[in-house]
Amino acid sequence: MKRLCKSSDKGAVALPEDIIFDILHRLPSKSLARFKCVSKCWRKCIPQPNLIGFFYQARDTLLRSQIRFFSSSLDESPSSRLVNNITSLEESVKFLGKKKREYIVASSNGFLLFVNNPRVYYVYNPVTRQRLALPKTKIRMKDAAVGFFCKVDDPAKDVASFTIVRYALPSVWGINFTSITIESFSSETNTWTANDINLDVPLTLCPSWDIKTSSVGVIDGVFCWFDQRPQITVYDSVHKCPWALALPESEEIVAGRDSSCFLGISGGALYLALNDRFGSPITVWYLESNIRSRDAVWVRKYVATSTIVKCPQAFGLASLHVIEKRNMVIHPTVPHIFYFVVRGKVISYDLERNIAELVYDFGEPCWKTRCYTLFSYEWHQWPRLL
């Protein structure tokens, strides 16, 4: 086992890297910021906030126990490799998902939200392996759209607070709702609260067939979901009001190509991508107007034809007539980088440089990976406590 330093004192013991890392792991971020100046060895053990990874899990019942993690870091420094080698995030979730109906429903700020039955949720930190079980919900929802947001109120205390919102999804299409019940949980009060809201404008909600029911993120207290109508449903948790956010004016979207649209938040802005499922260019818009404005203003940001379509043989996809992308996810901090799954391969695509790279290969038949759901995970300077 590699030693960090050699001791000239016979009575002193040189500790292995993993033990020192574990000790530093338990200290607050404010102390760690000072400890970076102690030595190069300690600095190496304190990672930087630029490791990006993904948890993925099958939504199929028979495969649900398979929770995995892979990283796509822009940083190849020793500290980021140390995080991967010593704090194995995949090892930390191996025991999760083995119970029936237990799966990841959302991720936020380095934390995961799990549900193991329609009324039982818990928050999990895969780095510290800290698990916090929440009280049972007041309302039983057979199928719910869920929003989860975790934030750090006081960096000096390393304590995170979080909010969860959810609402029931219908079992049939085309129902206009004049009222909706939103159930929310706050870690500050440790209670679930149900609000019955009458809507000025009827809201059409869709079933969650073959889509993620977790929100794509939160902007200033506003949760956002994307469904198959296609429609962006938002809920303002501050003013307690939901509504449908207008989509960009696009012939492809209006024509109903909803399965090829993906919504995401990067760098605090809302982005909508139209996937080039049939070889047409990838088009990306971002929301220029305030998220609370009912008059949405979308600006076309990127239009690019993926190199995967131009050179499919480079990714082992030359035999495919149609390159179908699934599970498209935007990079949480770099808005021009997208990730998607093609035939069991996770590929990153830089729209500015028109460069595609193979990030991860599931190594499984594509029919198994079709039901995998990706959850982006951003490693911050140091893990926070619940």
Image: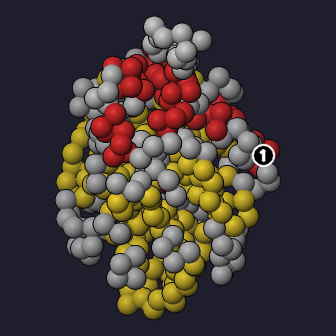
Quadrant of the image occupied by residue 373: top right
Is 235 drawn above or below residue 369 in the view shown? below
Is 126 drawn above or below residue 169 in the view shown? above
User: In this view of the protein, which residue sits in the foreground, 361 or 383?
Assistant: 383
User: In this view of the protein, which residue sits in the foreground, 29 or 13?
Assistant: 13
Give coordinates of residue 85: x percent, y percent: 55, 23
Task: Answer whether residue 270 is visible to the viewer in this image.
Answer: yes
Tag 1 secondary structure: loop
Residue neighbourhood size for the residue with mark 1, other residues' Cα within 10 Å, grouped as few (<14), some (14–19), many (≥20): some
Quadrant of the image occupied by residue 44: top left
Which residue is drawn at the image coordinates 56% and 60% (left, top)? 213
Q: How is the image coloured?
A: secondary structure
| Left or right position of 4 against 16 | left
User: In this view of the protein, which residue sits in the foreground, 231 or 239?
Assistant: 239
Which residue is drawn at the image coordinates 65% and 81% (left, top)? 138
Give coordinates of residue 199: x percent, y percent: 42, 88
Which residue is drawn at the image coordinates 46% and 50% (left, top)? 384
Task: Answer whether residue 227 is visible to the viewer in this image.
Answer: no
Is 384 drawn above or below residue 241 in the view shown? above
- Label 1 belongs to which residue? 98
| Residue type indicated by callout 1 | Lys
User: In this view of the protein, which residue sits in the foreground, 341 or 85?
Assistant: 85
Which residue is drawn at the image coordinates 60% and 75% (left, top)? 168
Give coordinates of residue 32: x percent, y percent: 36, 39
Q: Quadrant of the N terminus?
A: top right
Give coordinates of residue 366: x percent, y percent: 65, 30
